[in-house]
Structures are given as structure tokens and as C-alpha cells.
């Protein structure tokens, strides 16, 4: 699912920064190994995942995040996939696991 930054309301009514669901779409999520950063992924050396999104399903922006299999992925770059694919490649960085608890 794709989420955009937004002001949200906390439990006591105060506004705070957060994220809101934009859309849930089909996508192919692929973790990237350090050795496999071909092509455009070299522009995003801290990317840990590449998400292929079918063209026209959603216009992903650089300040968004994806949630996949319980993992939060911050968008670090968006590029069109090589022709003839009608996809966007969204390069993301995995957020570290929360230590709160």
C-alpha cells in the first residue's frame, strides 16, 4: 500500500506529522542485494528494495512510503522502467525496526 505524508490527529486531539493511505495496488517488490544495483539503482545507493508498479495505477512521489508484508519502505527514487515495460520502478529504503515497546 502507498502512504503520503499528512497531519494526523493524536489521541488527545493535537496535530502531529504522520502518513495516510493513498491506495493499495498490485506491485512486484524485490529486495536488492548490495551487489545487484544495475542501471538506475546506482542513483539510489541506499535503496534496499525495488518496487515495480504498473504504469498509470498510482503516481508515487518521493516523500511517500510503501508498506509491504508488515515492513515500512521509504521512497528514495522513482524512475520509469526500461522499455517496453509500462511500469515505474520505485526504489525504497527499509526503515529500521522500531525499538519502542
Image (tube, rainbow, N blue to C red):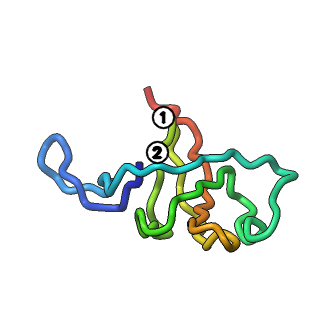
Q: Is residue 21 left or right of residue 52?
A: left
> Residue 67: horizontal and vertical position, in percent?
46, 45
- Which residue position holds label 1? 70
Q: Residue at x 43, y 26 (%)?
A: 101
Label 1 Cα crowd, 10 Å radius (few <14 / some 14-19 / many 20+): few
Q: Which residue is drawn at 20% across and 56% down?
A: 15
* Vertical relation: 97 (above or below) 33: above
Residue at far right of view: 35
- Which residue position holds label 2? 67
Residue at far front of view: 84
Regarding mark 1 in the picture, which secondary structure is present there?
loop
Label 2 Cα crowd, 10 Å radius (few <14 / some 14-19 / many 20+): some
Q: Which of 54 and 67 is in front in this view?
A: 54
Q: Is residue 55 left or right of residue 6?
A: right
> Residue 83: horizontal and vertical position, in percent?
68, 73
Q: Residue at x 32, y 57 (%)?
A: 22
> How many labels, in total?
2
The residues bearing labels 1 and 2 have C-alpha atoms spaced at a distance of 6 Å
**Which label sits on residue 23?**
none
> Residue 49: horizontal and vertical position, in percent?
65, 51
Q: Nearer the viewer, residue 77 or 6?
A: 77
Regarding mark 2 in the picture, which secondary structure is present there?
strand
Asked whether disc 1 touches disc 2, contact meaning CB atoms under 8 Å apart, the reply is yes
Q: Which of 47 and 84 is in front in this view?
A: 84
Q: Residue at x 50, y 67 (%)?
A: 55
Residue at far top of view: 101
Q: In this view, does 95 lie to the left or right of 44?
A: left
* Vertical relation: 12 (above or below) 18: above
Amino acid at each position: 500500500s502507498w502512504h503520503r505524508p499528512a497531519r494526523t490527529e493524536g489521541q488527545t486531539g493535537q496535530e502531529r506529522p504522520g502518513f495516510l493511505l493513498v491506495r493499495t495496488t498490485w506491485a512486484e517488490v524485490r529486495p536488492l542485494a548490495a551487489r545487484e544495483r544495475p542501471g538506475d539503482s546506482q542513483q539510489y545507493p541506499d535503496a534496499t528494495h525495488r518496487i515495480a508498479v504498473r504504469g498509470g495505477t498510482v503516481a508515487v512521489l518521493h516523500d511517500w512510503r510503501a508498506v509491504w508484508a508488515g515492513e515500512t519502505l521509504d521512497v528514495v527514487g522513482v524512475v520509469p522502467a526500461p522499455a517496453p515495460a509500462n511500469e515505474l520502478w520505485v526504489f525504497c529504503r527499509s526503515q529500521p525496526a522500531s525499538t519502542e515497546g
